[in-house]
Amino acid sequence: MTVALACAVLGAVVATLLAPGAGAIDRDSPVHGDRSLAAAAVEELDGAPVHALSVAEVTSQGTRTATVDAPLHGTVEIGSVSKALTGMLYEDMVADDEISPDQRLGTLLDLGDAPAADVTLEQLAQHRSGLPRLNMGVSAMARMLASQLLATSPYDATVQDVVDDVRDADLDADRPQYSNLGFAALGHALAAAAGTDYPALVRDRLAEPLDLETLRIPDGPEDLGERAVPGVDANGRPQQSWADVGYAAAGGIRADAATMAQLARALLDGTAPGMAALEPTEEFTDDDRIGAGWLVSKDDGRTITWHDGGTGGFRTWFGLDRERGTAVFLSGATTADLDAVGQALLHEAGEEQAS
Amino acid sequence: MTVTLIVLGALAVLTLAGLARAAVAAADRRRVLLAAGEALCLLLVARALMPVTPPVVVAWIGTVAVFAGLLGLAASRWSQLPLLAPSTGRRGVVGAVVHVVVLVAVIGMVAAGFV
């Protein structure tokens, strides 16, 4: 019995050292960039298990960026914030009369007589197409479960894979339904209308015009670039990056904090392409309205235009208070939700410098 | 996440109960090894998938402590046990080998995710 007790104590000590959350950033972690911004972000984390952090703040007083336990110009996976950018591309092409909101998806992608062929581009841009979040067959479910267990990416789709998934999907159009599949299809439809592919569309119509230096879509897990910050889940496991062209329009873009700050400035001063995407035109949930990809919500009396994102190894929040001219981008190597942290930082944005 | 937690908790209770039975009453080392492997596998999977909240982390640490204690208990009987009980048939041996291969594969793959 003495041996058993001794083993139990030893096991508890080892388990404490190896417990999930060990190694997460704290107030003593190395900071690059603006120290006060980093300190405010770490304070708002309140002990959440985040293993690297990238943050940017834009106010009328200027731009601040910082990273914690990551290089200042390290790129992160912005996840579903990519949908907001796809929405901007959609509105930009509508404004240029290259596409129309009521154009059918089947006119741009080879969907035959599938139900999704009659879905309009506007419905896709507002999660009203009826397409499911993902087309989850048995093999996709197995892949999703295995990816959770083995810390690998569940996405490895080509454009044709996405077209096939859309062709096979059943529609449930009774209510708005958040759809990664729908946004992936929208991105490829926009690219088809422009006679290019989705990564080139992002590069030519967003990244280069706005000088978004690091904003790009990797061509696979081996194409992340030298500055890539590794993704880590809340439990501290390194996660394979989500880098596939198939679902890139729904969540495959990488960027660093400075680049996202540059995008935020263009959005706040109205010079970004497809600004109409930020204008809400439909109800989405009880609390949120939706433009094209962008969500608009009330937060403590303020109107926040935002999107969040999540991948295997990152959680991201990108939000604008357009009335006050402030914006915050926040991305952490974690699977812990950072929405509240982003909202709090946006709420505080500019107040410290103004006081 | 709640479903994950419930499933992991139930599996933890079952596997630790199995290890406890093996530690005090197994007829051979094969049974102790398999029960320990199952429990180790569960602890690793739980470490990979469980939500990182203070109560859950404390519960995991406690589970590891119980696991280690049961291993200590089993170790005290180890030298008195045969590798295989005399009644073990050919099917039991083959089953144990397959069981070990599956456990080693799962433990290896999940453990690799932590590196």
Image (cartoon, rainbow, N blue to C red):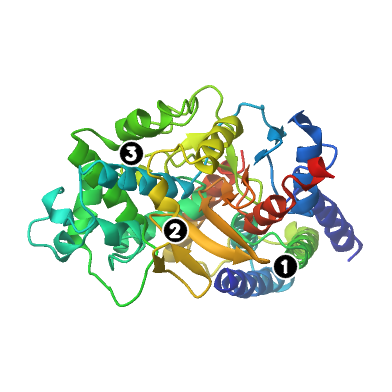
Label 2 sits on what residue type? Leu
On screen, residue A319 versus residue B22, left or right, reads left
Do badges 2 and 1 share one subunit? Answer: no
Label 3 sits on what residue type? Val
- Tell me if mark 2 has few (under 14), some (14-19) or many (20+) residues whose alpha carbon lies within 10 angstroms of its own: some
* Front: mark 1 or 3: 3
Q: Secondary structure at mark 2?
A: helix
Do residues under tags 3 and 2 come within 8 Å of each other at their CB atoms? no
Mark 1–mark 3 distance (CA, rounded to whole Å): 52 Å
**What residue is at 46 percent from the left and 37 percent from the top?**
A271
Mark 2–mark 1 distance (CA, rounded to whole Å): 32 Å
Q: Secondary structure at mark 3?
A: loop
Task: Out of B94 and A39, give the one closest to the viewer.
Answer: A39
- Chain letter of the residue beneath label 2 in the structure image: A
* Quadrant containing the N terminus of chain A in the rendered view: bottom right
Residue carrying label 1: B23
Label 1 sits on what residue type? Ala
Q: Secondary structure at mark 1?
A: helix
Task: Out of A235 and A3, give the one closest to the viewer.
Answer: A235
On screen, residue A187 versus residue A44, left or right, reads left
Do badges 3 and 2 share one subunit? Answer: yes
Do residues under tags 1 and 3 come within 8 Å of each other at their CB atoms? no
Q: Position of residue A119 (x, y in %)?
A: 20, 62
Mark 3–mark 2 distance (CA, rounded to whole Å): 21 Å
Whether residue A43 can be seen here: yes
> Extreme left residue here?
A113
Task: Out of A320 and B97, give the one closest to the viewer.
Answer: A320
- Chain letter of the residue beneath label 3 in the structure image: A
Whether residue A154 can be seen here: no
